[in-house]
Image (cartoon, rainbow, N blue to C red):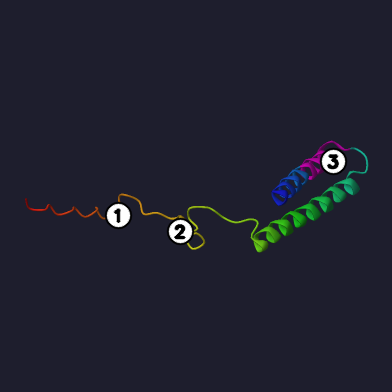
Amino acid sequence: MLLKTIIVVLFIAVLISLFSGLNFLVKDLGNSKRRLLVALGTRITLAALLLGTIAYGIFTGQLGSTAPWDRKLHPDATRVSPQTAPPPPVPAKKPE
């Protein structure tokens, strides 16, 4: 749970850095190039940390995919749809 919280916090920090860079680009009248480059560097660092955290979570098994199209990863979670499955056999009647 802690790993997922860290991932969410890093993602929000990347978004904040993205919008601060946009703000520096559009509205800043001072030394916007320097501040814009700092925001870009911060965003790149945060994105690298985010990808590294996700890779660590997948490598350690704390994160995984439960998508239905991952049949190779979860063969026991797949089921046959009723349209493609053959009908169940009809039990034979016992003669009286």
Q: Which residue position holds label 1?
A: 85
Q: Nearer the viewer, residue 51 or 36?
A: 51
The image position of residue 82, as x and y in percent, is: 32, 49
Tag nearer the camera, 1 or 2: 2
The image position of residue 47, as x and y in percent, is: 75, 53
Residue at horizontal 86 percent and vertical 51 percent from the top: 37
The kind of residue on which mark 2 rests is Asp
Q: Relative to 13, is 63 on the left or the right?
A: left
Q: CA distance from mark 1 to mark 2?
A: 17 Å
Q: Which residue position holds label 2?
A: 76
Q: Is residue 33 above or below residue 73?
A: above
- Which residues are the magenta region? 16-28
Mark toward the start of the polypeptide (3 vs 2)? 3
State the predominant SS element of the stretch in magenta. helix
The kind of residue on which mark 1 rests is Ala
Q: CA distance from mark 1 to mark 3?
A: 60 Å
The image position of residue 80, as x and y in percent, is: 36, 54
Q: Relative to 42, is 5 on the left or the right?
A: left
Q: Which residue position holds label 3?
A: 24
Residue at horizontal 65 percent and vertical 57 percent from the top: 62
Mark toward the start of the polypeptide (1 vs 2)? 2
Q: CA distance from mark 3 to mark 2?
A: 51 Å
Instruction: Residue at the far top: name it.
Output: 27
The reply to whether the magenta stretch includes residue 44 is no
Q: Is residue 26 above or below residue 44?
A: above
State the image quarter where residue 20 is shown: top right
Indicate the secondary structure of the residue bearing disc 1: loop
